[in-house]
Image: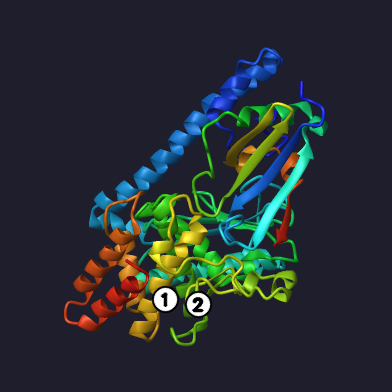
Amino acid sequence: MDIPGVSSCGCFIIPRKVLLRFSRDRKLKASQRKAFADAVRLEKGWRHARAVKSRLALLATQVLPGELGAAASAPPHVLLFDCRHGNVLPGVPVHDPGASQDQAAAQAFTETTEVVRFFRSVFGRNSLDGRGMALLSSVHYSVHYNNAFWNGSQMTYGDGDGAIFVGFTRATDVIAHELTHGLTQFTAGFGYDNQAGGLNESISDVFGSMFRQWRAGQTVAQADWLIGSDIMGPVALARGYTCLRDMANPAARHCLSPQPVHFSRYRDGMDPHESSGIANLAFCQAAQGLGGNSWEVAGQVWFHALTELKPAPDMKMKAFANRTRTVAAALHPDEPAVRKAIDAAWKAVGL
Amino acid sequence: MTEAGAILEVERLGGLAGFGAGGSRIRSRGRCDLSTLPQQDRTIIDGLFGMPHQGTTAGGDRFGIRLTRRTSAGAQMAVVPEAAVPLRVLACLRDELI
């Protein structure tokens, strides 16, 4: 659909009130006003469809009888698209991405497939929705784009500017971090503001780091607990920045974005990438206190805490901490050391 | 009609790296002369001011864009999803370490 002001900027999410205003603006031609009016009808329908899709996915996981579960047990399709440096998603399909000469496409495909295997073999989870939903990833988004994101339906990766960041598909933890936003969306549904936002971001860092450790076969002692170390570009590295965040030492000077290490430093309105440091440190300390591989005990507790209870878009950090304490007691009733390690980790960060 | 010399300051917020977060060493900022933008883009920009704080859209690690419009009448600010901002405005952004 050729909509004035939309096709030229490649925008798909213009606020509805703005579209309405344009549809009534007599300074525009009648054909243009009609185009904006059409966009209003389309936008409303699209948002409704997206909301229905999310609610249906959640409902299906709760009510589908066991025999139908088999139909949802097939592994998900992993699909790759190339934005060719544009801003339109998903872009052009990449055929046989695992064998692609395009390094970004091959990396995104390979690691997304491995994340699927990680969720399935370690946590018994079939894709993000638990029902084998297809996973779409787009690479080469925009120009020198220093970001990767989950947009509610798919993954998107920029190539970085080559100075501060290199291509975002180079980091296994980044790929798993973004996919985990989808896991959170289909389970606990943490919002993206205030404490829930910090938890949302922390969950993504937790599973991102676990996946990176799992891929590398690392124990908690061998892991570096850094987030984004593989996407740091030469200019960032020359300035002494080795990562985006450090789960073991959130306030460290080598982090591009230092974080608080205690809940007493939390403030409403904080960027979730800042407030996530509190829960990040708690997970790291819990896992280190338990030893072995992070995904075996601490990871299981966090996974069950995230996925087995009612959606909580406004979850508070203390409530989530208590949720993990409860899950730890349920999963390990005869192992007080597990409950003790998790309890101590949360207390260390003021929760 | 856009006032001559009216300036639009643009800043990216959030994203995976936490642009503009407290203590963050990475920023993405720029400014452009509103009068040099095409009418379509100026109309879109006009529409983005005066709306309630919108922040980012659904998902994770999306960028929000803080727009500050300075005219002789004063300054107005809005925070909107990146996807709502014309590409010509986003093109003025420069990422930097501070």
| Tag 2: amino acid | Trp
Residue that appears at 82% across and 33% down: B36
Q: Where's the N terminus of chain A, which quadrant?
A: top right
Q: Quadrant of residue A32?
A: top right
Position of residue A62 relative to residue A259, above or below, is above
Of the numbered discs 2 and 1, the one sitting upstream in the chain is 2
According to the picture, the residue beneath numbered tag 2 turns out to be A225
Residue that appears at 63% across and 18% down: A34
Q: Residues within 10 Å of mark 2 (few under 14, many from 20)?
A: many
Name the spot of residue A251 as percent of width and height, x first.
Answer: 52, 71
Q: SS class of the residue under badge 2?
A: loop
Q: Is residue B29 visible?
A: yes
Q: Where's the C terminus of chain A, which quadrant?
A: bottom left
The answer for how far apart the CA atoms under marks 2 and 1 are is 8 Å
Residue that appears at 32% across and 78% down: A297
Which of A327 and A141 lies nearest the eye of the viewer?
A: A327
**Residue lying furthest left:** A334
- The structure's colour scheme is rainbow
Name the spot of residue A199 as percent of width and height, x first.
Answer: 41, 59
Q: Is residue A3 visible?
A: no
According to the picture, the residue beneath numbered tag 1 turns out to be A284
| Tag 1: amino acid | Cys
Which of A119 and B75 lies nearest the eye of the viewer?
A: B75
Q: Please tell me the numbered disc located at residue A259.
A: none
Q: Is residue A221 left or right of residue B43?
A: left
Name the spot of residue B35 as percent of width and height, x first.
Answer: 81, 30
